[in-house]
Amino acid sequence: MLEDHILWWRSKRGSRRAFDLIYQKYVDTMLTVALHLLGNAGDAEDVVQEVFTALVESPETLELRGSLRGFLAVCVANKSRDMLRRRKLALTGRDDTTPADSDEPLELVIRNEQILRLREALRRLPYEQQEVIALHIHAGLTFRALARALQVPLGTVQSRYRYGLNSLRMELERED
């Protein structure tokens, strides 16, 4: 965490190398969060690009409190929410990625079907529940960090997570 604060400080003072290191360290995690929230790889890439562009263009307006990963993840979640509001997206559930750890075609088909079912079930959750699940699982934020970042009580974050997981469980069981 100290390393991140030093990188942040150097980046705010114009160090291209520090920014590059921040980007390399966190771009994959941020893409995962955005993809989870938006369900579309192109939109996820756009949101992540917007967040990192803001870091370069106006670093003086951004204040880091807590972890850099958490800060970036919340920025990605906020930009994702803005995009959904602006475009009122009708998310498709199309999965452009194929798991590469298996050579068995049947296993690939089953995994892809499971991923699609999970994504569709996630999209039916209220956005606040999707957001908490994505930031907790994909960005690794604790519930306390989420509560601070989202400016809601800890209990609210925990409830959103619990209700979201329960809804997912019931939805997936109903489909079986």
Image (cartoon, grey):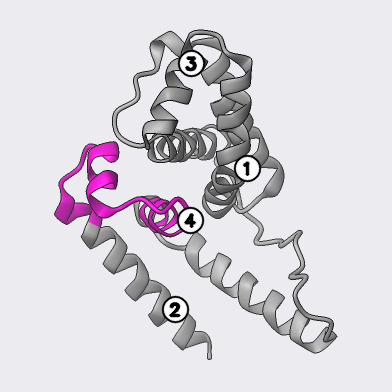
User: Residue under circle 4?
Assistant: 138
> Which of the numbered marks, if any, corresponds to residue 44?
1
The residue that appears at 44% across and 33% down in the rendered structure is: 75
Q: Please identify, in this view, whether the residue under mark 2 or under mark 1 is nearer the observer.
A: 1
Q: Amino acid at mark 1?
A: Ala
Q: Quadrant of residue 18?
A: top right
User: Residue under circle 2?
Assistant: 171
**Magenta extent:** 130-157
The residue that appears at 23% across and 39% down in the rendered structure is: 148
Residue in the foreground of this view, choosing between 34 and 14: 14
In three-dimensional space, the C-alpha distance between marks 4 and 1, rounded to whole angstroms, equals: 14 Å
Helix, strand, or loop for circle 1? Answer: helix
Q: Please identify, in this view, whether the residue under mark 1 or under mark 3 is nearer the observer.
A: 3
- Asked if the magenta segment contains residue 18, the reply would be no
**Circles 1 and 3 in contact, beta carbons < 8 Å:** no
* Number of numbered labels in the structure image: 4
